[in-house]
Image (cartoon, helix red, strand yellow):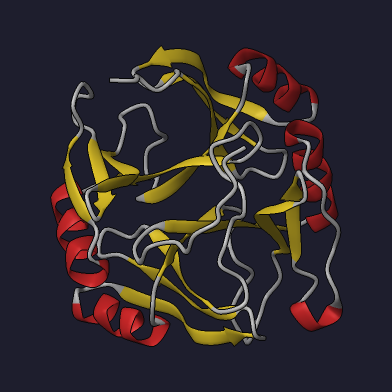
Amino acid sequence: MPEVTSPYQPGTPCWIDLAAPDQQAAIDFYSEVFGWTGEIGPAETGGYAVCTLNGKPVAGIMAAVPMGGQPAPPTVWTTYLSAADADAASEAVSQAGGTLLMPVTDVMTLGRMCIAAEPTGAVFGIWQPKDFPGAGIVNEPGALIWNELNTTDPSAAATFHKAALGIDSAPMEGAENYYALTVNDRPVGGMQPMSEQMPSGTPSHWLVYFAVTDTDGTVDKITAAGGAALQQPFDMVAGRMAVVADPQGATFAVISPKPMHQG
């Protein structure tokens, strides 16, 4: 079981969370599909639910409600990138042409965070860990396995992430028009130009992938639970995947990964 036992390197996706209009319905849906355990949290955390898999934190689900005069957030999964210093990272984001959507904030003693958008519009979070490092389990069925930036301008996005967060990018071998995002030469995510199959007007965005043992069976389970298949299961270089939406419209991908080649 790939439990995370060492700190996430700065620039590495370390956490994901979902803002949902009906928080309890979202918790119930993902628990049914992926086997998570979760419940609405205490009032002092705004009811934020830390969902677990095999006793380890795997993702957050919160209620999409207006906060601080701001409208309710969209129903989307947000990818958080680890940072050694959230304040310095937010300043670097601004200097590199990004936009700070939510200023750096303390989350009790758990860490410091902010929400930003890169120049092409993709929204992401920055997480400076204190007591809470991030996901405690990854790359297992039901857990996060990949984070992918779909962007209208890969070149601009690559320049931004290198300048702001030290994330490198390079064409991925065997995958046309696909780029690996790397930290210290280790792949931590992917990037690709926006697909023509996406609905017109879809903004640049991060897509989260969850590992599953049976992609087709999982899609059947998702649709039976009120979700939808946006891209039916298909085979690709990393495994068999599908792009789906939960009953409240949040988009994500599921993939049954091919075994890693042992060279």
Query: Would you place residue 60 above or below residue 143 in this image?
Result: below
Total labels: the figure holds: 0
Q: Residue at x 27, y 68 (%)?
A: 165
Answer with left or right where residue 104 lies relative to residue 227: left
Q: Which quadrant of the view contains residue 36?
A: top right
Query: Would you place residue 59 above or below residue 244 in this image?
Result: below
Residue 213 point in image, percent of width and height: 62, 20
Q: Residue at x 69, y 64 (%)?
A: 64
Residue 242 point in image, percent of width and height: 52, 23
Answer with left or right where residue 236 lies relative to residue 114: left
Residue toward you, 123 or 256: 256
Q: Which quadrant of the view contains residue 189?
A: top left
Q: Residue at x 82, y 53 (%)?
A: 38
Query: Would you place residue 111 above or below residue 206 in this image?
Result: below
Q: Quadrant of the N terminus?
A: top right
Residue 134 point in image, percent of width and height: 57, 62
Answer with left or right where residue 104 lies relative to residue 173: right
Q: Can residue 16 be seen from the camera position used here?
A: yes
Q: Can residue 151 be seen from the camera position used here?
A: no
Q: Residue at x 29, y 85 (%)?
A: 91
Residue 250 point in image, percent of width and height: 61, 45
Q: Which quadrant of the view contains residue 49?
A: bottom right
Q: Quadrant of the C terminus?
A: top left
Residue toward you, 152 or 52: 52
